[in-house]
Image (cartoon, rainbow, N blue to C red):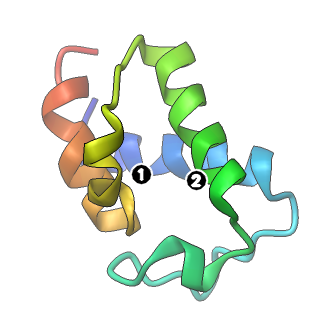
Amino acid sequence: MNRNEIRDVLLEIIADIDEEADFAALDDHKPLRDQLDLDSMDFLDIVMELRKRYKLQIPEDEYPELATLSSCVNYLEPKLRHI
């Protein structure tokens, strides 16, 4: 997967979790929790969906890597390169 595909997958997962998410003003470099109505359970749902779809194991100590959309893509790109 390339960077744009990873970003699209993340937005799709977030849209499934937060049906009212407004991506029009989303800044890829600001924390997702500050921009969208995501709580800690929603965040875990994102992690679990990535695990389910792509068999990814994301250690809890690496969760901070998933704070922004940009950092999510940076973190996931090498892990999803082969898909």
Report the quarter where the N terminus lies: top left
Q: CA distance from mark 2 to mark 1?
A: 6 Å
Left/right placement of residue 22 relative to residue 44 reads: right
How far across and down, in percent of the image, does residue 79 sit? 20, 26
Q: Disc 1 on helix, strand or loop?
A: helix
Residue 69: quadrant of the picture = bottom left
Residue at image location 40% in from the left, 84% down from the top: 30
What is the quadrant of residue 66 in the picture? bottom left
Q: Is residue 37 left or right of residue 62?
A: right
Nearer the observer, 76 or 81: 76
Q: In this view of the protein, which residue sits in the foreground, 40 or 68? A: 40
Q: Which residue is mark 2?
A: 11
Quarter of the C terminus within the rendering: top left
Crowd rating for badge 2 (residues with CA inside 10 Å; few <14, some 14–19, many 20+): some
| Three-letter residue code for mark 2 | Leu
Amino acid type at image mark 1: Arg
Percent x, y of residue 39: 69, 64
- In this view, 57 is above or below 45: above
Q: Helix or strand or loop: what does disc 2 sit on? A: helix
- Decide: is 75 above or below 29: above
Which residue appears at 27% of the width and 45% of the height?
A: 61
- Does the residue at mark 2 contact the one at mark 1 (Cβ under 8 Å)? yes
* Residue at the farthest left position: 78
x and y, in percent, of residue 62 in the image: 26, 46
| Residue corresponding to mark 1 | 7
